[in-house]
Each structure stands twice: as structure tokens, then as C-alpha cells.
Image: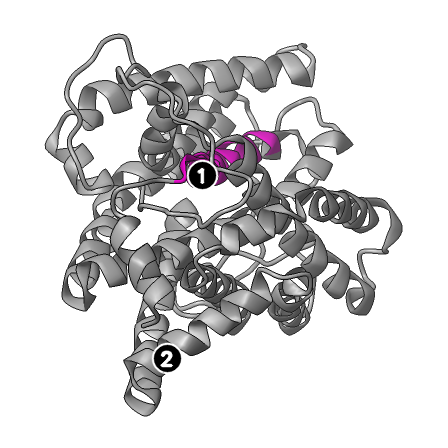
Amino acid sequence: MTATAATTSTTSTANRVHGLDALRGGALLLGIVLHSLLPFIADIPWLITDSVTTPAADDGVVVIHLFRMSLFMMLAGYFARLTLHRKGLRAFTVDRLRRIGLPVIAFWPLAVLPIGILAVVGADVRGQELPQAPPSSLNPVLAALDPGHLWFLVVLLQIYVIALAVRAVVRRILGAERATTVAERAGTWLSGPLGVLLTAVPYAVAVLLQGAPVDGGIHKPLSVLPEAEVLAAYASAFAVGYALHARPDALIRMSRGRWVHLAVAVVTSLAVLYVIPTGNLAALAPVAALASAAWCYALTGLCVRYLNAERPAARYLADASYWMYLMHLPLLIAVEIPLADLALPVVVKLLITWLVTFVVLVLSYHVLVRSTWVGAWLNGRRHPWTWPPMTTGNRPRNRLPADGPAQVREP
């Protein structure tokens, strides 16, 4: 390990880039927004279809789907390397099995199983037939154990296995010090001007591998089995984050190109939506991949640069976002059922859905999770009880300097 990396590894435990907290929480909360838009898209086999649909909902889903999970996996890779260096391999493995693996099993009956029941109830109440999903060739047992919206945890566990195996082989061949040097050089390339293009390549390959675009991006797996295209897209994003952590000033380097990245993200997203025909996979794959990478780089740069003061409400929501995402989908469906046939504008229905869902999820987090053993399980710590929610008593800290090493602690 180089002297700079060693210094960063040591000092990183005492400081924090709060922009990454906001970004991680935002990526999870965007998943709630995405699922809330699906009832307003016509002709898709979703759990509930509203009586009013709009193309704007479809556009919103496509843009969010392009980058959200890639961004989450990139952050997961960043914090994986940080935690490995801080806690060691054994503690890292135990921590990830407890906070990522166990929730898949424990929350499936609570957060996934009720969804099908609610969909049946909703169809019955409205006098409609339940939307039929496309035929599947999966084994019936695997099909019945569909991880639902918890699929990203299953994929993340698969990526951890791959990452730890690759790390072990590389360290065995090169030695720990040379392996660190290689990772730092990769971080240098990825945080530089060509980083977005390098990051986009595996995503484009993944879109081509799956053979058909799904909302312009990568489909979600329907079982717990590994899928090549899913791993190609998200394991590569994880590797990008892992390498970025190896370069001490990678976040600063990325943030310098934030406005260019944002412009590229907007233009390429518009091209995916309105310019490139859906069936033209050869043209869609590279543009969708560039859009995904550009959004990841732009949002990371913007959050690191402008959201790095500690804000109690943002910090609170970052902590709450994991619980909120795990538990949101049954609640969303329950709220949407009585709204589905009302003659209200889509915007009004969305505002009602978001308000009710947000209030219930935040209050349930505050009462049931934050100051209990569940909070210690999911977030790694139990916070003191406070009221009202989203108050911590912490004073804002100074924003990250425009130049200088990024010292980061895991959320």
C-alpha cells in the first residue's frame, strides 16, 4: 500500500463525505419513485394499472432505470473496499451476510409475499382480471421464490462472492502492495476524462447480451440464480466504485467534470427516449450505456461538491432509506388500489401516494427501527431516541474543499 493510500485508509474512519450518504439514500428512494410511476404506464403487466395513464410516467421510468442500480452498485463497490481495508476480510464477510444476506430471507415474507395477495385483492375490488406476466421457463420452485424488489440484494451478494474471489487471486499473484497499485491506477483512469466511456463499455455489452432492451436498460433477474447480463452490468459498476476508492482524490477528480457529465446524461437520455428506435439494439446499447455512466458520474460529482455539509434531515433519510425501500412496495400497492379508479390527475394521485407512503415509512422507521435492534442490524448502529423524526442535534459541517483528498467513511 502506498503512503497516500495508507494515510487515507487511516484518516477516512474519522471523516465523511456526506454527499455519498445523500446519493446512496437517493438511489434507494428513487426506486420507490420508479415503482409509483408504473401504474400509470399503459400495456405493461404490472401489479395494478390505473384508470389514467400518461407517456410521461413511461419516460420517467426509463430514465431512472437507466442509471439507478448502476449508481447503487458503484457506491457499493466504493464502500466495499473501504470496509475491507478498515475491518478486514472476516469482519467484512460477516457484516455483509448480516446486513445484506439475512434481510433477503427475513424480509421476503414481509415485503414480497404480500404483493401478490394485494394484487389479487386489487383486481377483485375493481372487478378486473389480474395482469398476466409473460410466460416463464423457470423451474416452478424458482419462479415461486421470485426475490421481487429485493433482487438487488441477491445480485449484490453474488457480486461480493466474485469480488472477493478476484481479490484473493490478484493478491496471490501480485502481492498486496502491487494489487493496491493496480487498483489505484485503475481509479486514476476511471476518475479521469475517459472514465465515463470506460464505465459505459460493460453496460453496453450487457444490453447486447440480453438481446432486447428493457426500459432502455437491464432487466431484473426473476430468480436467485446468477444471470450473465445482469452481472456484466452491475459487477462492472461495482468494480468501478472499488477502483475509485483506491485513488485518494478520485471523487474530487470526478466532480470537476460534473457539468459536462450532466449535459451528456441529459442528451443521451433524450436520445434513448425520442431518437433511437426501440428495436435498434446496436444503436441503443452504446447510447443507453453512456447515459447510465454519465448519470452516475454527474450525480456523484454534484453530490460530493454541493451536498457535503452534514444536514440532519438528509442524514436521517440516508439511514432510513434502506428500511423504506425494503418495505415500500406492499404499501405502495395498498395506497394505489383505492386511487386507481378515481377521476384525478396523475400528478394528484402521485402526490397522495408519495405523501402517504413517505409518512408511513418514516414513522415506522423511527418507531420500529432507528432506536431498536433492527436498526443495529440493518444500518450497523442503534441511534438514540429523538422526537420529532429527522432531528439529530448535529451541526452542519463545512463543505468538502474544491481541491484536496476525499476522506470518506462508510455510511
| Prevailing SS of the magenta stretch | helix
Of residue 340 and residue 247, the one placed in the foreground of this image is 247
Determine if residue 129 is in view: no
Looking at the rendered image, the disc whose residue lies closer to the viewer, 2 or 1, is 2
Real-space Cα distance between discs 2 and 1? 32 Å
Q: Residue furthest left?
A: 373
Q: Is residue 30 magenta?
A: yes
In the depicted structure, whether residue 351 falls above or below residue 248: above
Which comes sooner in the sequence, label 2 or label 1?
1
Pinpoint residue 150: horizontal percent, then vertical percent. 37, 48
Q: Residue at x 60, y 58 (%)?
A: 218
Q: Which residues are magenta?
A: 17-37
The type of residue carrying mark 2 is Ala
| Residue that numbered label 1 is attached to | 28
Label 1 packing within 10 angstroms: few (<14), some (14-19), many (20+): many
Which quadrant holds residue 5?
A: bottom left
Give the residue drawn at x 15%, y 66%: 90
